[in-house]
Image (spheres, rainbow, N blue to C red):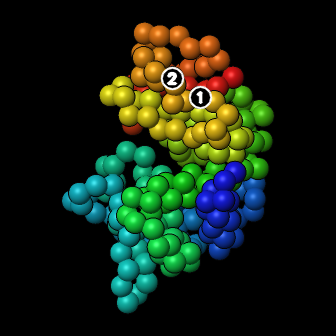
Amino acid sequence: MRGEQLELERLAREIRRRARLGDDEVALATTIAGRVLGPNAIAIDPCIRGAAYLITNGEGHQIVLNPAAHDIRFHVAHEIGEWALRFLAKFDGDEGARERAANYLAAAILAPPSALLRAYAATGERIRALASAFGLSQTSIVLRLAEVRGDERAVVTRTGYVFLRSQGAFPWATVPLLDVARGQARWAGLAKARLRGGIDEGRVALRAR
């Protein structure tokens, strides 16, 4: 892992420690929020724009959540990550960097390395089963596997947006990822799996073998 990743992994472990979770323990994002932010950590508001946001006032911190949003557990974990970056790590990056770091933390909080590796040893590349076990989208679990296992993975949307976790051993920049995902081109050494349902519908996971 790179230095930034190691720092984020350490921060995720600190969040889980504050939530009184063991290294192998899997918990709901709402449970973690309640243990870290307090009993009133979650407020429901179906009228908000977007999925969730973090508010801070004289009574502490609270995550306001739209119950109709897709991938609710990830959004709650993302806002926990936002809280940790602002109030534990004193993160000083720009908004885009903070959003990326909070996304990383969300997956790291919900899928700690030892638990994910144990589950992967039992299921292999059953992406939907792994996603369900950790309360993550299939996209998130594919990228988290790359982070934890140190292998080369990407997810391509049908519009051509690429989510990438690369350790630098595979020449992603030379691969026509969208063509490969659509089946218009083959590329030696890449395995692919179509993702189904919710925000994952129509996306394709690519893995360097």
Q: Is residue 49 above or below residue 128?
A: below
Residue 143: image tag: none
Please provide percent x and percent y for residue 129: 61, 33
Q: Could you tell me if residue 197 is visible in this image? A: no
On-image quarter of the C terminus? top right
Q: Specify the amino acid type for callout 1.
A: Pro
Please provide percent x and percent y for residue 72: 42, 51
From the viewer's perspective, tell me whether residue 191 is left or right of residue 156: right
> Is mark 1 in CB contact (under 8 Å) with mark 2?
yes
Q: Nearer the viewer, residue 82 or 38?
A: 82
Q: Nearer the viewer, residue 35 or 175?
A: 175
Please provide percent x and percent y for residue 113: 72, 50
Q: Secondary structure at mark 1?
A: loop
Residue drawn at point x = 65 percent, y = 45 percent: 147
Determine which quarter of the picture holds residue 110: bottom right
Q: Which residue is mark 1?
A: 171
- Mark count: 2
Residue drawn at point x = 54 percent, y = 54 percent: 104
Residue drawn at point x = 60 percent, y = 39 percent: 166
Q: Is residue 39 above or below residue 157?
A: below
Determine which quarter of the picture holds residue 143: top right
Q: What's the distance in space between the residues labelled 1 and 2, CA to CA?
A: 7 Å
Residue drawn at point x = 59 percent, y = 33 percent: 153
Q: How dense is the environment of label 2, judged by Cα within 10 Å: few (below 14), some, or many (20 and up)?
A: some
Q: Nearer the viewer, residue 39 or 206?
A: 206
Determine which quarter of the picture holds residue 145: top right
Q: How dense is the environment of label 1, judged by Cα within 10 Å: few (below 14), some, or many (20 and up)?
A: few
Q: Nearer the viewer, residue 48 or 14?
A: 14
Q: Which residue is mark 2?
A: 175
Q: Is residue 20 above or below residue 206?
A: below
Q: Secondary structure at mark 2?
A: loop
Q: Specify the amino acid type for callout 2.
A: Val
